Image (cartoon, rainbow, N blue to C red):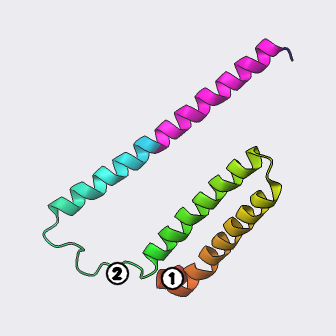
Amino acid sequence: MNVVQKAQLTATGRLGMRLFLLSLSVLFAASIVGILVIRMRAAVWPPEGAPPVPAGLWLSTLLILASSATMGLVQKTAARQQLAGSFRYLLATDLLALLFLVKEPLINPLFWVG
């Protein structure tokens, strides 16, 4: 495979990834708009009989955001060839993910509903 073919393959892959991310963004935006429309038309929110929001929702969000931040730090330190720092941040990312996975069935009662 020559240089031109590699460049075309890379460009094709990038275009495909951009289209994929764009389609996910549109799907996410449409979901948010749909929820907002339903919520604005409802007389009472949340509707009667709806299950309550899980108590650990904000903790889950915080753990995912922290995990994302530590993963970004892994990339940054690895690019600088700081392997000890990369290892520490990767370990922190793994621990946050493990904490998230252990926490979910304990806090979220809907986890066990089949």
Q: Residues within 10 Å of mark 1 (few under 14, many from 20)?
A: few
Q: Is residue 71 above or below residue 110?
A: above
The image quarter in which residue 97 lies:
bottom right
- Residue in the image at 53% along x and 32% along y: 19
Q: CA distance from mark 2 to mark 1?
A: 14 Å
Q: Main secondary structure of the magenta part?
A: helix
Check whether the beta carbons of the residues at disc 2 and disc 1 lie within 8 A of each other: no
The residue indicated by pointer 1 is 113
Q: Secondary structure at mark 1?
A: loop
Residue 27: percent from left, percent from top: 42, 45
Q: Nearer the viewer, mark 2 or mark 1?
A: 2
Seen in the image, is 86 located left or right of residue 36?
right
Residue 41: percent from left, percent from top: 15, 60
Farthest residue in the right direction? 1
Q: Which residues are magenta?
A: 3-24
Foreground residue among 106 and 58: 58
Seen in the image, is 91 located left or right of residue 73?
right
Identify which amino acid the numbered label 2 is placed on.
Pro
Q: Is residue 102 above or below residue 42?
A: below
The residue indicated by pointer 2 is 52
Q: Earlier in the sequence, mark 2 or mark 1?
A: 2
- Residue in the image at 79% along x and 52% along y: 82
